[in-house]
């Protein structure tokens, strides 16, 4: 399923069982109109990122919103098709969360590896509605990555700790979606080259994550890494806390997991359940709830009502065959 701007839910699993509300209808119609004028939402894999939009060097990103959300995606080869599937769900993410808090704005980043990638850190400004389409299209997941099981997550963390300003937010969300470990220290030469700052000595990455956790509500949404799961998970749990490391089971449900965490924190988990039930069958819901069961503030029983509803509906309607949609194609 390719998600589009507006309130058309006809392609959902259970259309007509959820709407964004009458108050949001004019806004969603305007978003749909703007999106149609802009053209296709298919994310073409460009030869290089649009650096005027995503280059982090000498850059500070700012949000005056009370509810900014930062989303960073590991764009290396081990992530396979996951970045494309996550990007495709932008309208769903933004339209659902803006229903809960209408001042939401988002920043997107791609994380690579300084050892092997040409653009190991890419960061957009914060923005709203279909402006976010242009931001996502400016990012380049290179599909490469460094040796071993580490990528340069700590370089992204350093950037957010020093170059992201959210003066009106109490504790904004920061989601990282990846599958590997970070490097133990922040390299001064890499900071100079990619961010433009001068630091005199390596910085301890664990200490940096602890500092960043005072500014952002951080989550690591973790794709499985066969044979290395325990080692990778342990490092992240030490850095940001065990409840903030969320295991993922399906690339199609990553954004649902992030939305569920936000909805629960903001007090809209019931609406999120209705949204999820309208879009997914019981397998999809089970996957999301399995990820959310250990997240802070999410009761393991949440979602059972929705799953039972879908189980009852399963025999009454045939599931349309899923199409394989290639979202990233070479120019």
Image (cartoon, rainbow, N blue to C red):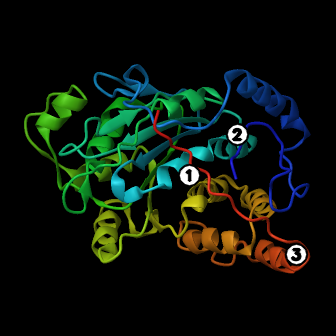
Horizontal relation, residue 220 to residue 87: left or right: left
Q: Residue at x 41, y 24 (%)?
A: 50
Q: Residue at x 34, y 70 (%)?
A: 233
160 and 110: which one is in front?
Answer: 110
Does label 1 or label 3 sit earlier along the sequence? 1
Residue 245 sits in which quadrant?
Answer: bottom left
Q: Secondary structure at mark 2?
A: helix
Task: Read off the residue under disc 2.
Answer: 98
Mark-to-mark CA distance, 2 and 3? 29 Å
Residue 281 sits in which quadrant?
Answer: bottom right
Residue 74 is situated, as x and y percent measured from the top left of the image, at: 38, 50
Q: Secondary structure at mark 1?
A: helix
Horizontal relation, residue 187 to residue 227: left or right: left
Q: Secondary structure at mark 3?
A: helix
Mark-to-mark CA distance, 1 and 2? 21 Å
Task: Read off the residue under disc 3.
Answer: 313
Going by the picture, which residue comes out furthest to the front? Answer: 331
Residue 324 is situated, as x and y percent measured from the top left of the image, at: 62, 57
Horizontal relation, residue 194 to residue 329: left or right: left
Q: Nearer the viewer, mark 2 or mark 3?
A: 3
Does label 1 or label 2 sit earlier along the sequence? 1
Q: Residue at x 40, y 57 (%)?
A: 79
- Across the whole image, how many numbered discs are drawn on residues? 3
> Mark 2 packing: few (<14 Cα in 10 Å), some, or many (20+)?
some
Give me the disc on residue 77.
none
Q: Residue at x 70, y 39 (%)?
A: 98
Horizontal relation, residue 186 to residue 7: left or right: left
Residue 294 is situated, as x and y percent measured from the top left of the image, at: 53, 73
61 and 213: which one is in front?
Answer: 61
Task: Read off the residue under disc 1.
Answer: 85
């Amino acid at each position: 399923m390719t998600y589009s701007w507006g309130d058309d839910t006809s392609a959902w699993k259970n259309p007509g069982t959820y709407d964004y509300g009458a108050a949001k209808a004019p806004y969603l119609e305007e978003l749909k109109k703007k999106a149609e004028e802009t053209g296709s939402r298919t994310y073409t894999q460009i030869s290089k990122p649009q650096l005027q939009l995503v280059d982090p060097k000498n850059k500070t990103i700012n949000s005056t919103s009370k509810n900014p959300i930062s989303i960073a995606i590991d764009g290396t080869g081990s992530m396979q098709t996951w970045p494309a599937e996550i990007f495709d769900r932008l309208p769903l993410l933004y339209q659902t969360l803006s229903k809960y808090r209408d001042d939401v704005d988002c920043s997107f980043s791609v994380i690579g590896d300084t050892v092997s990638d040409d653009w190991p850190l890419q960061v957009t400004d914060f923005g709203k509605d279909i402006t976010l389409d242009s931001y996502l299209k400016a990012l380049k997941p290179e599909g490469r990555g460094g040796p071993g099981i580490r990528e340069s997550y700590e370089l992204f963390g350093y950037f957010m700790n020093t170059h992201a300003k959210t003066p009106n937010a109490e504790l904004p969300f920061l989601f990282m979606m990846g599958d590997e470990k970070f490097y133990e220290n922040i390299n001064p030469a890499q900071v100079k080259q990619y961010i433009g700052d001068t630091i005199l000595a390596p910085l301890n990455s664990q200490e940096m994550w602890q500092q960043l956790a005072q500014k952002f509500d951080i989550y690591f949404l973790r794709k499985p890494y066969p044979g290395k799961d325990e080692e990778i998970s342990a490092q992240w749990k030490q850095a940001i806390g065990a409840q903030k490391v969320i295991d993922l089971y399906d690339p199609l449900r990553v954004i649902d997991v992030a939305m569920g965490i936000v909805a629960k924190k903001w007090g809209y988990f019931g609406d999120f359940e209705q949204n999820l039930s309208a879009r997914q069958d019981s397998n999809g819901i089970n996957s999301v709830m399995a990820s959310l069961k250990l997240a802070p503030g999410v009761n393991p029983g949440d979602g059972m009502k929705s799953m039972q509803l879908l189980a009852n509906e399963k025999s009454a309607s045939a599931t349309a065959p899923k199409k394989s949609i290639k979202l990233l194609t070479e120019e």
